[in-house]
Amino acid sequence: MLVTGGAGFIGSHIVDRCLERGCETVVVDNLSTGKREHIHPDAAFYHADIRSCELHRIMDGERPDVVVHHAAQIDVQQSIANPLEDAAINISGTINLLKASVSAGAGKFIYASSAAVYGAPAALPIAEDHAKAPASFYGVSKYAPEYYIRTFSSLYGIDCTILRYANVYGVRQDPKGEGGVISIFLDRMLRGLPLRVFGDGTQTRDFIYVGDVAEANVQAMSRGGGRVINIGTSAAVSLNGLIEAFEAVLGKKQEVSYEDARAGDILHSSLDNRLAREHLDWTPKVDLSQGLKLIYDYYAPRYAANKIEEAVRAVNGRQTALAAT
Ligand SMILES: NC(=O)c1ccc[n+]([C@@H]2O[C@H](COP(=O)([O-])OP(=O)(O)OC[C@H]3O[C@@H](n4cnc5c(N)ncnc54)[C@H](O)[C@@H]3O)[C@@H](O)[C@H]2O)c1
């Protein structure tokens, strides 16, 4: 199996899970946002761009049976600032990978699509056949490859499953820049900073734990052929509700600053997961409070250890400065 974006947040969890199941796993990633330390040591790693010619050499050498495509430009605001670059990675990169997959004889292509393809929903939870009206170039660049994948599939016979994710959260999600709201909130809470909410906090999201998303990919390796399938919880949680859930985990109130809503942000979202239950034999296993507790328990001691290290460095620095005077 070959995972593009396997050094990234979601891709690295898929790699871990596949290796746990004894599946040989190859990672292709250009490390633009991914991190080498996220790649499981038992995975073969190629530091390469999905847009490159090198990708074809890698695929021809590895000849993976399944290609799991997660490499992407994922930042909505970046897609609005630089739609050409966003399209080059998400659309042209996917076409290059599809060509390489077909010529390397891959049997199945699994694609990480997004709730962003739907735009503002007419009704919740959103089913797969809901109208598609992306509100950002990111939504467009995640949607266009769905057509390329289906067309490659019908022209060349490669099987495919398109998974449209809700808001994924969990360990390894980068809180810097435009990371997911949960990783950003947790980072600010652990640094004692107020939470920033764009809008009034009544906007809703469907938060799905990364372990459940990894499991959906594993299930899709042998199921869900030719289908587009939402991966979410079917539930909508407001940002204010999320803050309350975090407060319950931390056992204290958080300071919140409300700022202007941003262009391109969807107001409400939750994905109907009926098809995932039916065709992938999948259900989400980790609910929001369990998931928040898992990431809090993982990061809280690490942030505390970092704080101690910083304090020791500051004291050592002061002593060196004093000794020099
Ligand atoms: N995180 C979410 O909530 C969410 C929701 C819906 C869909 N998705 C999709 O899931 C996939 C993974 O997202 P993520 O949150 O793990 O993001 P991420 O940024 O952590 O992972 C993306 C990975 O792709 C790599 N990459 C980027 N451009 C590349 C290129 N040109 N060539 C090779 N590698 C490249 C990055 O280095 C990174 O490791 C993306 O396709 C994203 O659109 C994510």
Image (spheres, grey):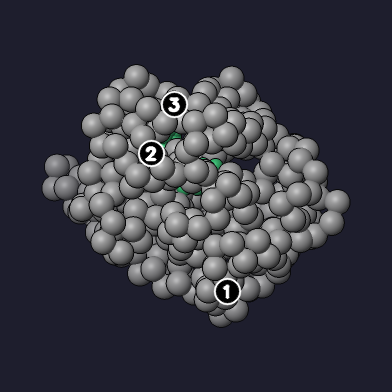
Residue appearing at x 36%, y 35% in the figure:
105
Q: Farthest residue toward the left? A: 323
Q: Quadrant of the C terminus?
A: top left
Q: CA distance from mark 2 to mark 1?
A: 35 Å
Residue 230 visible in the current orientation: yes
Q: Which mark is residue 106?
A: 2
Q: CA distance from mark 3 to mark 2?
A: 10 Å
Position of 90 compared to 303: left or right? right
Q: Which mark is residue 99?
A: 3
Residue appearing at x 37%, y 21% in the figure:
52
Residue linked to disc 1: 287
Q: Is residue 4 above or below residue 217?
A: above
Residue type of the residue flagged with mark 2: Ala
Whether tag 3 and tag 2 are in contact, CB under 8 A, the answer is no
Q: Position of residue 261 (x, y in %)?
A: 76, 45
Sooner in the amino-acid sequence: mark 2 or mark 1: 2
Residues 87 and 283: in front is: 283
Q: Position of residue 284 (x, y in %)?
A: 56, 70
Q: Position of residue 67 (x, y in %)?
A: 40, 42
Sooner in the amino-acid sequence: mark 3 or mark 2: 3
